[in-house]
Image: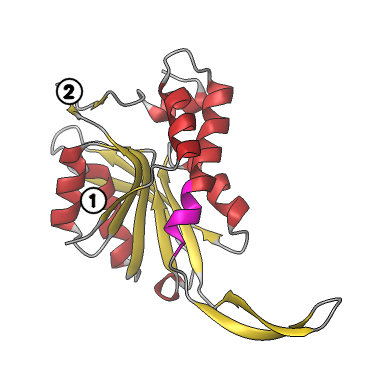
Amino acid sequence: MSEVHVIDHPLIQHKLTHLRKEDTGAKEFRELTDEIATLMAYEVTRDLPLKEIDIKTPVTETTAKVISGKKLAVVPILRAGLGMVDGVVDLIPTAKVGHIGLYRDPDSLEPVEYYCKMPTDIEARELIVVDPMLATGGTAEAALEFVKKRGASKIRFMCLVAAPEGIERLQVAHPDIDIYTAAVDEKLNDHAYIEPGLGDAGDRLYGTK
């Protein structure tokens, strides 16, 4: 079974509280999402392998550590996931960025992929799939299945807020993928919104309804 990592650093929790507030406008919401994504990326990449190389400082020669050739990619689930991309890429500027778009068929209620663009060497990269909310888990489950079908095997899922129902669904469907979140909230309400949650992340990011 995959692990759930709740990243409860005080700076993240402080910013998440302001993100949740109803009166936080789109500009501040985008800024906070970006900042939280950067802070979370430190923990998501904590176990990247290192290797030693010889370098010369202004004082002497020494041996120091660098990341050991790990190739990374960030894959947002459209559209709300776009709000987290810059925060991760600011920290890891060499990471490539893929995109995956899904909608739910009104008749079958099944997720349908309408867009997917991945790095050409996806099978050699470790993917961080990002979406602010993990609610029912349906969209995340489908997105992860789609990227696996394209050759990805080393994947992590990162969100800002998760519901227990979504976590359970994702762990059953993808027991090989760890989940990183800033908070596990109480439940889903009758409209499948996370409570207390933060509302519709896409609408709040882009000022839409």
Q: Give the image location of residue 77, x and y in percent.
A: 39, 46
**Res 110 → quadrant:** top left
Q: Taking 27 as reference, is 166 above or below it?
A: below
**How far separated are the C-alphas under marks 1 and 2?**
20 Å
Whether residues under marks 1 and 2 lie with C-beta atoms below 8 angstroms apart, the answer is: no
Amino acid under disc 1: Glu
Residue in view at x 46 percent, y 26 percent: 19
**Res 122 → quadrant:** bottom left
The outermost residue toward the top is 23
Residue in view at x 15 percent, y 47 percent: 168
Callout 2 environment at 10 Å: few (<14), some (14 to 19), or many (20+)? few
Amino acid under disc 2: Asn
The disc at residue 116 is: none
- The residue beneath circle 2 is 189
Q: In which quadrant is the C terminus drawn?
A: top left
Q: In which quadrant is the N terminus drawn?
A: bottom left
Would residue 28 be found to the left or right of residue 171 on screen? right
Segment colored magenta: 40-46
* Nearest to N terminus: mark 1 or mark 2: 1
Would residue 157 be found to the left or right of residue 193 on screen? right
- Please indicate, yes or no, whether residue 83 appears anywhere in the rendered image: no
Callout 1 environment at 10 Å: few (<14), some (14 to 19), or many (20+)? some
The disc at residue 141 is: 1
